[in-house]
Amino acid sequence: MTNRLKRLELTWIGKEDRPRLEPRILLEDQELSYAKRVSKDDIFDNRLIHGDNLLALKALEQEFAGKVKCIYIDPPYNTGSAFAQYDDGVEHSLWLSLMRDRLELLSKLLRDDGSIWISIDDNEAHYLKVLCDEVFGRANFVANMIWEKRTTRENRRVFSFNHDHVLVYAKVKSAFEAVRNPLPLNQTVLDRYKNPDKDPRGPWQSVSANAQAGHATASQFYDLVAPSGVKHRPPEGRCWLYTEERMRAEVTKNNIWFGRDGKSAPRIKKFLREAQAEDAGLTPETLWTSADVGTNDSAKKHLLQVFDGESRFDTPKPEELIARVVEIASNSGDLVLDSFLGSGTTAAVAHKLGRRWIGIELGDHATTCCLPRLKKVIQGNEPGGITARADWKGGGGFRFFKLAPSLLEKDKWGNWIVSKQYRPEMLAEAMCKLEGFRYAPDREIFWSHGHSTERDFIYVTTQNLSPDQLRFISEQVGPERTLLICCGAFRGKPNFPNLTVKKIPQAVLARCEWGRDDYSLNVAEQAPVVAVEEAKAEASSNNGTKTKAGLRRKKAAPVQVLPLFAGIDNGSKR
């Protein structure tokens, strides 16, 4: 019997199988992007992405890792309808794998003080909790919000399920707790503030003047004499909140209330203006009632109002619910992300509340629901929801993106080649992303398509480079910099210390799964994974080589000396 300790974890069929994701580039559809200037504070740095959310998250990783303040997702609940062809064990395992893959990428995007909020029902809530413990760390669990999603009783079932869960995790719990926002004072709380003694400082409410005596000092036990002459002692097991000296001072300042007759137990006056000045707010509770954050039914009615009575989405979340999440977890200008955008509620709410946002949606809802809804928000023509509360008048904009096709495809003989859909600048950007470079083409220096540091650059070309061409590039780069060249082919054995030369597509064949566009939760429609094992041997034998001599950098040659891409006009634009 072994004494070796094993990690406590949730296991399921296929847990060890992980997708080898291709880091796609994003292509803007400028005809669908939209903007309208209303005020100087308008925010235009928003993205609406149409495509598989796992691939989209991978596409965002390089640019947005560690930059997202608040993530809200409402993934498909595992009710079995999406997995009808599988038995329960396989169905459950597929759902867990698909969720795990997305949560791991989402975790990378979060800031240290960021948080993720996940709507889920009872079918998977408890398994999802354990899964999130693995991904985010059990110590970073914040809370499980209970949302009253309906107020009517469902009499056709054994139990009427009136709530959903919203699991909350932080990237770093202590960092999140330090910046978590309180809820604003609502009308119920404001109604508690009165002014029965006509205090010139305005409305106030009273709180107890005594506290538990467990950690009290001797100075907190004394007889308190009210201005009326009545003596008061703290109840058994309790002490006064203030020392006798401090209490006398507070009485003199009219900060202690002894009731209308002056004989009641003392209470401390807390003024509304002080609470508002300190922006104290309310500590969020974990029970969210329909009266505060709406229901599924109220969200449906709102969406019908937005689209003039036309039903475009079956299961929207109310704007009030998402607004509470966004207001607790972020501030104006922070970045909010939803990778299951659905009807566009998270983006609409984030926009109205002055946050930047990224929304991802695979289905047709991206263009039939999210796009027109967000246009209405920007036009100031989206009624209902939080529009009135936020005093929203319109303005701002977003850019509409689609995922680029897979970089590689097979020709009619079964060989991997660069996709014919890729224009030169698309190929350069894709190779930058694959190799970990920031795509930033230099119009003056033909060989600089991107950089990883101030001295490390990348050049992408479809040419077959000769030794003379490589020598010329090496001289241009100079001894103080290094350059990765990704080219169609090269002749000879390059021998330049400042150059690394790789062939494409051979250099990237074994990196990821090519040609797969759908990792969605609709498993029945998923395309088969493209095998890449056949490319490994060829890729390993064609990896780039480094060489020796380098010369002082000369003046950069014009692009025409070495075309950016063989046989392609260098002036083309995406």
Image (tube, rainbow, N blue to C red):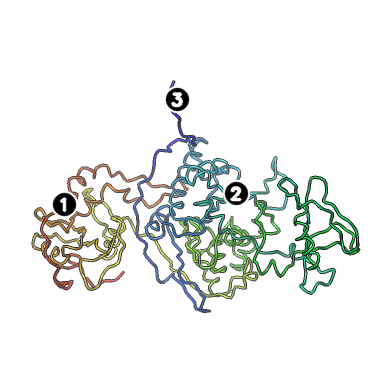
Of tags 3 and 2, the one toward the viewer is 3
User: Which residue is denoted by mark 3 in the rendering?
Assistant: 3
Residue located 82% across and 45% down the image? 236
Q: Is residue 242 left or right of residue 136?
A: right
Front residue (pair 503, 184):
184
Quadrant where the N terminus lies? top left
Kind of residue at badge 2 = Ala
Circle number at residue 545: 1
Task: Indicate the position of residue 72 as horizontal and vertical percent values.
Answer: 53, 56
Q: Quadrant of residue 272?
A: bottom right
Of tags 1 and 3, the one toward the viewer is 3
User: Which of the marked residues, 2 or 1, is nearer the chain's N terminus?
Assistant: 2
Disc 2 to disc 1, C-alpha distance: 52 Å
Front residue (pair 231, 548):
231
The reply to whether residue 533 is in sight is: yes
Task: Indicate the position of residue 200 as horizontal and vertical percent values.
Answer: 79, 74
Front residue (pair 337, 76):
337
Q: As displayed, is residue 72 above or below residue 80?
A: below
Kind of residue at badge 1 = Thr
Q: Is residue 149 left or right of residue 369?
A: right
Secondary structure of the residue carrying numbered label 2: strand
Kind of residue at badge 3 = Asn
User: Which residue is denoted by mark 2 in the rendering?
Assistant: 143
Disc 1 to disc 3, C-alpha distance: 48 Å
Mark 3: give few (<14), some (14-19) or many (20+) Cα within 10 Å: few
Front residue (pair 9, 338):
9
Secondary structure of the residue carrying numbered label 1: strand
Mark 1: give few (<14), some (14-19) or many (20+) Cα within 10 Å: some
User: Which of the marked residues, 1 or 3, is nearer the chain's N terminus?
Assistant: 3
Task: Indicate the position of residue 81 as horizontal and vertical percent values.
Answer: 54, 44
